[in-house]
Amino acid sequence: MAEADQQQPPIDLSKLFFQSTTTRRRIIASYWIVVILAIPIWWRITSIDRLSLPESKVSALDTRDLRLPLRVGLQSNVPGISSNSIETQLAHRLKRDAESHCVFFESAPVDLNRQSTPGTYDVVIEPGAPNLLLDGRRLSVRSQGETEEQVLDALTNLVLPSSDGMEALRIVKYSPRFRIAFSLLNEDATSGRSILSWDVEAAIKRYLAPALEKLSILHNFTIESQVQYHAPLAFRPHEIQIGEQTAHSLTQEDLTVFVNSAEWTLSSSVSNDPVIHFVLFVPSADDSPLYILDHNGTPSSADAFILPQWGGIVVSNNARPHLKVADLEHTFVTFHNQLLSLLGVPSLPANVDYDYSLPFTDWQLDALVRLRTMQNVENSKETLRSIVALVHQIENMPVGQDVKGDVQGVLDALDLVFAESSSSLMFALRHSSDALTRASRAFFNPGMLALLYFPAEHKYAVYTPLFASVAAPLVATLAREVAAWRKTRREQA
Amino acid sequence: MFSALIYSFLFLSAHVFSIHAQEFFQEQLTLRPHRDGTVLGHFAFTTLLKSATPREPETIRIEDTSQHYTLFPLALGQVLREYAITELHLSLNAGKWSYDRWGYPEEDGVGTGAELWAWMAEGPGASVDERWRGLRSNLAGLFCASLGSMDEQRTTSPSLTFLPEGDLPGPSTPYQLRHGTLPSENVCTENLTPFLKLLPCKSLSGIASLLNPHRLFDADWHGMGIHVRYVENAGVEVRLTFQGVFDPVRYSTDGKRDWSLHSIFDRTIQKTCPVARHSKIRLISTTDAVDVSPAPNTFNAAFSVYDVNTVSKPLDISMQWSNESHFEYPLSLDSPPPTHISVRRTLKGTEQSRGQLAIVIENHQDKQIKASYLETMPWLLQFHLNSIQVKWNSAPRDDLMSIVSYIPPVPHSRPTLLQSVLTLPPNGTMDLTIDVTKPFLRYTEHPPDAQRGWDLPPAVFRPLIIANDSNLRRLPRIYTPILLVDLATPDFSMPYNVIIMSCTLIALIFGSVFNLLTRKFVLTKIPNEPPQ
Amino acid sequence: MSNTLGMYRTVKRLGIPDSNIILMLADDTACNPRNKFPGCVYSNAARNLDLYGDNIEVDYRGYEVTVENFIRVLTGRVDPSVPRSKRLLTDDRSNIFVYMTGHGGNEFLKFQDNEEISAFDIADAFEQMWQKRRYNEILFMIDTCQANGMYSKFYSPNILATGSSEVGQNSYSYENDNDIGVAVIDSFTHHILQFMEGIDKTSQKTMQDLFDVFDPVKIHSTPGVRSDLFHRPLSQTLVTDFFGGVSQAEVFLPLIDTKTSMPPNGLDSKQPRAQDDPQDDAVDDDSGVFPSIRGSYDADLLALSSGKISLSSQDGMPARGARAWTSIALVGALVVWVGIRTRAKR
């Protein structure tokens, strides 16, 4: 038996299917294939969703400039004034400013019967007593002699109003919607001098509605008003003597800190539209009359001031329990002017007259629309550039479909602006406003919040316990198998 | 869009808040001494916007009319219009209202923490839930409260208990209720500041000048509330309230319960609010012999009234128990108790996974009382409805609980809503128990700081008694104190432990299997064969 | 907590309205039942200045104070339903003041007990703000242990940063209030507030004057200033540029022609004249962290922001505090991490 046992050939292990070299190599290979196939999936599921933005289009925007047409038709019925020469000079002057104002000059035939179109103007020079009168988009010049310079200056100022730095700081930023908040603030209604109510609604309708309606091309306004009976100042006005009388005064520094936001509940909470405030302030009996000092330190007749980008304030030394519409005329006319200046309606050249029953002229409106369109386009471009730059710079910032869609929307809207700019100023404005809104929405998309910084070392710390211990046998076996294979080959050779 | 803008600029259609809409403001302070030496101070500031109606939800997508207010708070008006809210109640309370010692409060809503409920008309444009979300976040911004976290996990619609207090316009319009509670909300000066700014006279004149945050927040119990309702034929009414239970015995140096406005609020009334139509202080009479100064303008058996607009200033009302050398706390509670029923609610069980909610309700009346019972429980506590047991004076009774309506919770998203009507026979005690499970939370759902547990909102009872004319009369809501539940809390270094542990296991298993599959087995001869 | 509230009070006193301040407070210190003085938070042990006051608005409190919310406020990427008072509404004319305090370490600051914001996060947030022109200038101030690491990663222009202590140093509290049992204010902040008390809305003191006050001996740590990103000389930068809400006003002369009921051409009759240079409002963002070494109250983070030119807005946010002892362990662990990381990089 023992013999027989010994005779039995030993089992050839390499013949067992699971011990054959091929099978083993296949097993190892399949492991490695799984690992290699898994890498892209792993990469995909651990990476942040970053859709590619149309970057080339964004950078192509740099070369596209907005050009808004100014079509001016000139007609001179005065001998000695040549419309051609005015036209040439005007074209020359405008060319100088065209770059910064995004306009180009076109001469157009005069047609006094055509419908008034933004961007198209007629200038008629006729003999008569010197006078410049605006009527719609027409400028009638009456002249008897040499007025070329004067007409040129007026025209240049009308189509391209110059703005100083102060003005730029004062004007509120463009927004498609504004809330206009009127507040009647009594410093202390218990002191005996106070205005308890006002006919604000009728006053707005009477004094501000025309202007607001005209501006509604640019902005949508929401109006609200409130009355407060305790609105203390954060400081005590200085006492001064005017003749026999004791009065109180506000210095220029006082004006800058006049608004006591801690005690005055002015901000509106419900929407995120920018608010323009108009305040009628009634000083208490202790502080009245209250005058504003000019910079020489003497009381001035001014009773109103503007806080740039914030709103306007009128100080009323004339308290009575109820203000009727007629009593509010002075206040609201001031508010009206403050509103125009805050919204950036340019001023007219000094010697130009217009129909005073209108809040302001179409020339001013067009100039404002051109300015706002230009700013909106610039801001939208700028925002797009920032988005692209940031996405490059911050690697873990996600870019979702809605961001991409908005960016594309901005590009489309800008295309429309460029396309419409030569035909319709109003459409250009509308699309530029759309582009601006979408650009900010894309930038402020809550999904774009970069993930919190998670250092690479932390990632290794999380992955190492798994990957290191799994990878070790995989690599070791592979190495051993490769060595064995090379050895066999060498032996075979 | 732009052509629409021109027309959307509405001046003309402002008939709702037109200049003819009159606004009235009145303020009232109610002072009520309690037997335990405390004094309830209840401020109510009511502004009525005459003949105004709530915004209709149909109009929510179009531009709203301009809002012009003189007395009505603009900030609140904006919120109400923006989300077309018909009725709104917000209360921010701190402390536990003790019904047995203090009786019914002047304002119903005394549940600890924040409670917000609103009735809204349904309509196209924006869904009720969207408006509810907007309302929450706007009120959160307005009152500096964390109402934004009163999300779907805390919102229910318990329309049996929270009936509208005013009228709902439009007989055919469907209305919906949304109700949410945040029992762990803190109440502090930052909530009072915006509250005061809504008042026409702020806290500078009139009764509101007594609202001194340092004293108010030192009270045994305090709570502020904003209540908006629409009253047919009157208009939209906003009532801002502040209630506090002050303890003059604690403030006094000689242990007496004498108090004055100055001793409670550290302020007196110096000036009247010029726009307050009525400004009254109501002093509820006590049965004790007390000296009250100054003399009230009018008084009757129940209370005395001071008209702040006419009384001489500064006004400092005081009440003195002159024949009492020092105050002795009453040893027993009032008999009969000041409320119709008393309720105690406890969470029993020490386990981290299960427990039992026990409610004890006592009827102090000689007649039967029905009471609606409401639990709005976050999914942190899940009821086993089959385990409800009702006992009356220790004997099981199945017939006392009726009309049970139950909306089960959905973990991580929806709370439980359990409403029912309990019948309480005269003079006795009901024991109600429900078994509950405490679920596990996700890692990220745990609060980020060292915490003491989760506050659970109060249960709300609304007793109905049969009045003399055999009609049902609704009594004020009764809130139970809040509960604290301790859920299983992991060791927060756990994720890293788990990572290491599971990685080790995976590596071990993988390694063994892999080795078995790829190992090369060889035969070796064992040299020393055993002898045959 | 009193660090943040002290800053809040200062910026508010200097004229920045609550609507422009985002205050984040992680703790309900004032009305916590354990506070012996309800509704009060005092600036020092003598308790002569109540920082909580009668008029405070906290925008983010409790569990709302998170790293995510803080970054969202800075970058403006907030959910559309977030109310106005919780947003930082600034533009390219706004100066922002960010103040943070709490438990910190090398290049991080703890929020609550379970997360921290790293220097990289803030640097990236500032860069995003810069790209969107959400600020003109930023003053970043931080009072934590190893505070100066926090601003070392900034790379956006026009940021002036200062911190209470160098990497490796602790920042210490000024004094303890034994009645309440906590440290009430940190040295660094205390000395800044002392300086600020001498400043009013129209003060001409410069940032250089402020930084000259820093005395490592008194503060018990070495404050740092980083001005390489800032393009104005410090000696010409007014403190009120960041802490004040100074705006300029234009006086309207009365209208000459009011005969017509319709407004006349008012733009001609209006003569704006402003005297002072346009000044900027400051925006402050502070998040405060108490030094972890002393078991002071919890950490707070306050962020204040204010717009420029027009009245600025500030927003403050308090950070929620971490229980001191837990945080010590966490801070320790993190410091080790950070240490390893920095070493590995070099």
Image (spheres, rainbow, N blue to C red):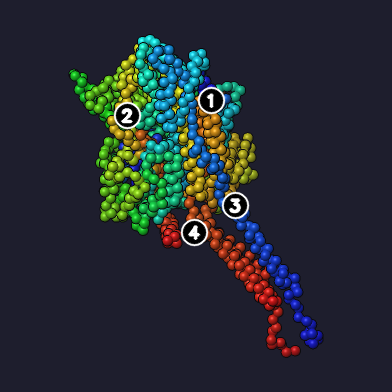
Does residue B402 appear anywhere in the picture? yes
Q: Residue at x 26, y 48 (%)?
A: C213
Give x and y (percent) for residue A111.
50, 15
Q: Which residue is mark 2?
A: C249
The Cα atoms of the two marked residues, 2 and 3, are separated by 56 Å
Which residue is the site of mark 3? A45
- The residues bearing labels 1 and 4 have C-alpha atoms spaced at a distance of 59 Å
Q: Residue flagged by tag 3: what amino acid is it?
A: Ile
Q: Could you classify mark 1 by the number of other residues whose Cα lies within 10 Å: few (under 14), some (14-19), or many (20 or more)?
A: some
In the rendered image, which residue does mark 4 sit on? A457
Q: Are marks 2 and 3 on the same chain?
A: no
Residue B163 in view, yes or no: no
Q: CA separation, marks 2 and 4?
A: 54 Å
Q: Do discs 1 and 2 belong to a common subunit? A: no
Are discs 1 and 4 less than 8 Å apart at CB? no
Q: Quadrant of residue B175?
A: top right
Does B92 sit above or below residue A228?
Answer: below
Tell me which label, 3 or 4, sits earlier in the chain: 3
Closer to us: A138 or A81: A81
Q: Chain of mark 4?
A: A
Mark 1 residue type: Ser
**SS at badge 2:** loop
Location of residue C292 in the rendering, given as x and y in whole percent from the top left corner: 38, 54
Task: Report the amino acid beneath label 2.
Answer: Ala
Q: Residue furthest bottom?
A: B531
Which chain's residue wears label 1? A
